[in-house]
Image (cartoon, grey):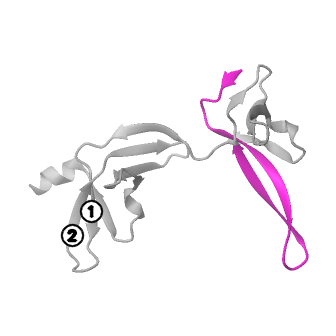
Amino acid sequence: MISATTPYVARYRQTADLPNGTQGSYTIDRPVLAWNDDGHALVAADERGQLVPASGYSNFDGVMPAEPHVLAVLPAPGWLAQYKDDSDGSIFTRPVLAFLVESNGDCKPVMVDSQGFTDDARDSENFVQLIDPGEQEAEA
């Protein structure tokens, strides 16, 4: 058995009865946890608590990379995220912890909150801009 070091998913096609009397289809992705010695993807069989071939289910639709996935984490010393306060319009900054480099080419600035949860610094509605350390030095 070979460990799954790069994230892949096994895709399964499902059908469902829709309220209008027709049937619709959707997919469910399950993480590939390992590969057997023959190169077949293995997933957890929920009902048995063991690894089984992903293709062993009749609705198996294939294996594909789990997109996007993190390829690298780069430190972000001196980077800041700038925000506008909703109550009074003042501008404030928060430090950027790191940049996540993803398989689709995106580079996401990551912040950490007081509970230790991380999030893309740009996801807040009051986000203004990222400030790189060079811009800070030019302003000083």
Q: What is the crowding at mark 2: few (fewer than 14 residues within 10 Å), some, or many (at least 20)? A: few
Q: Which mark is residue 91?
A: 2
Q: Are marks 2 and 1 in contact (CB under 8 Å)?
A: yes
Please, is residue 85 above or below residue 78 in the view?
A: below
Mark-to-mark CA distance, 2 and 1: 7 Å
Q: Quadrant of the N terminus?
A: top right
Total tally of numbered discs in the picture: 2
Q: Secondary structure at mark 1?
A: strand
Give the labeled residue for mark 1: 82
Nearest the viewer among 55 and 49 is 49
Q: Is residue 35 above or below residue 117?
A: above
Counting from the top left corner in percent of width and height, residue 61 is at 83, 46
In front of the other: 122 or 31: 31
Decide if residue 93 is on the left or right side of residue 4.
left
Q: Is residue 10 magenta?
A: yes
Going from N to C along the chain, the mark reached first, 2 or 1, is 1
Q: Point out the residue furthest to the left here.
A: 140
Residue at 34% x, 71% y is 126
Q: Residue at x 86, y 61 (%)?
A: 15
The answer to if 39 sits in the magenta stretch is no
Q: Which residues are magenta?
A: 1-30
What secondary structure is marked by label 2? strand
Q: Amino acid at mark 1?
A: Gln
Give the numbered dot on residue 2.
none
Q: Amino acid at mark 2?
A: Ile
Majority secondary structure of magenta residues: strand
